[in-house]
Amino acid sequence: MINNLKSRIFQIFQEHSLPRWLVLLIDMIVVYFSFLIAYMLRYNFETFAFDLNVVFRQSFMILSIYALFMFVFKSYEGMIRHTTIKDTYKIIMATFSAVATLFIVTVLSRQNDWQPIFNVSLSILLIHAGVVTILLFFFRVFIKFFYEFALTYSQERKNVLIYGSGDMGIVVKRIIEGDTKSQYRLKGFIDDNKKIQGKKVDGYPVYSRQVLVKEFIEKEEIKVLIISISKISPVRKKEVIESVIQLGCEILDTPSIDTWLNGTLDVKSLKKVKFEDLLGRDPISLDLEKIQEGLKGKTILVTGAAGSIGSEIARQLMRFDTKRLILLDQAETPSFYLGEELKSKNSGCNYKIVIGDVTRPEVMEHVFMTYKPEVVFHAAAYKHVPMMEVHPHEAFRVNVGGTKLVSELAIKYHAEKFVMISSDKAVNPTNVMGATKKLCELMVHAQSKRKGIKTQFITTRFGNVLGSNGSVIPLFNKQISEGGPVTITHPGITRFFMTIPEACQLVLEAGFMGNGGQIYVFDMGEPVRVLDVATNLIRLSGLEPYKDIKIKFVGLRPGEKLYEELFSNDEPMMPTHHPKISIAQIADSDFEVIYSRIDKMLGSLYKMSETKVIEEMQEIVPGYKSKFELIDL
């Protein structure tokens, strides 16, 4: 019976809302009749004690003054069902201003002997102001009470805790209550401030983080935790997520204020926390002055600019005072979207999208001759291990051949710096992709040791980048959204992980560190079990691993390692001034030998079998064990 009543009231609120003109009309009616009530109260309901004709004329003057200040303070604009302290303040200010004005009019009328219409008893003005304020406030509270009463009717709403009871938490609380289609029901706040724990904020209890245990979550039937702190450190955020993720709750995050659409937040803006948040990484500190010095007024070429790394490098470069960005990629559609994204940012940066293949000499010669880039970020490469394992010819042609061509042109056209993006798979490679990257490292290092060249050659090496094209996170999320199973190659497989912005910021930092010839290796933190990644992603989706989403082990793929490495045994690690960047010291390579063998392979590449291509690379790349050797073992 009660639920049916609540449902009916809630339906009325969903289908109807009072327009502003009607709220203003109701307020004016309240002002008019409360003035008559004030007169009656002043004279103890003895109507013969005053002139009704004068009273009615005065009431219209009163109504005009109040209406004026209602327009000034817009006390009628807020939605009645979401009345806040701010709305009450507007009512009080409108009433006070009207009373003050009427008080002045009354005093002036008595001094100048104006008509009786302007001479209103001061006691009546005060009684009227009190009655108006109470009635207008009661009207709004009455509507809000029924709305909140109706809100509790739905049994399908998820109980929510908001982590953070500050300004951001209050904003989230109001959007939850203000969205008639919201699927959430607030149960309280969690806050680390001991001074407010045990008290109430906006009518809801404030708990400490100690309530985040299974007993409390089950008792209160909490389904969702919303993190709503404007400035929360990555480490603290990681701790909060880890304390909740095992409890079966969905965890949502409140976006930063600068990302709110038109400066406002709605329920749809609340997003699931990302796996990156579980890394708990502190923000990277960059030497912006040195980077700016290296980029200012220069033409920058980014190859593979439409890819995950290349596009983020482009975004990072947009904030520096460069002369021009040349963003080159052979993929037309991703390049188009990158151009549209950069255009929408309207940063004033001069950039040019170029469609071209880094392995075509005539194309790249034209690019270098036309734009004469002074700094080159070479991110163009094939990177998917399983695909390259069955296409060794293409892996060698693009990764090695492309790097060779672009590096040679950098020297020919006197580029100041050449920065190549490598991979942790280049360390003790067991697959074609890793072997080609190692070969690129050797080639670039050999270029840096050539006599008479002024181009500085830098190599940057890092592991898996979260969210990049083809990375494990989007794949797992897709499998989870489809109901599973989530496929993992091996229960013990581990990987290093880094976010795209982290990696690209460190690429910029390393690019302007030294005088060339170094291989910079990024601190990726501790290796993470891929199985843990999968189970955490499932839990972050509000589901239970193995129960709601199955996990299936499919076996290691050809050339895939059980774990990755950032340094090989013959590469002593040397620190730099940046805590997240080290140098891998490798032996000098013989430029002539490496280049002659690469030229020979490129010249007869498609005359060789897949096995022959791999065997040739094994002779050049130290420590490369192919899938055939691994199978024999």
Image: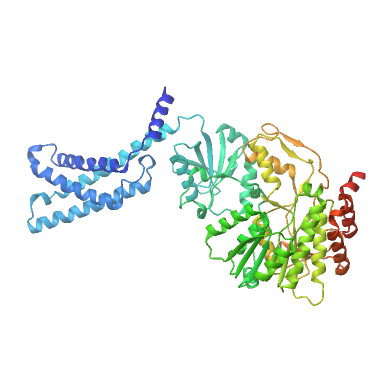
Viewed as shown, does residue 247 lie left or right of 71? right
Q: Quadrant of residue 452?
A: bottom right
Above/below status of 577 relative to 26: below
Quadrant showing the N terminus: top left
Picture residue at 87% right of the left edge, 57% below the top: 617
Q: Quadrant of residue 581?
A: bottom right
Picture residue at 71% right of the left edge, 70% below the top: 417
Residue 76 at least partly seen: yes
Viewed as shown, does residue 19 lie left or right of 29? right
Above/below status of 504 relative to 250: below
Picture residue at 65% right of the left edge, 67% below the top: 300
Q: Where's residue 321, x and y in %?
A: 58, 69
Viewed as shown, does residue 616 lie left or right of 332? right
Q: Where's residue 169, x and y in %?
A: 50, 47
Q: Quadrant of residue 418?
A: bottom right
Q: Where's residue 60, x and y in %?
A: 16, 46
Q: Where's residue 50, x and y in %?
A: 8, 42
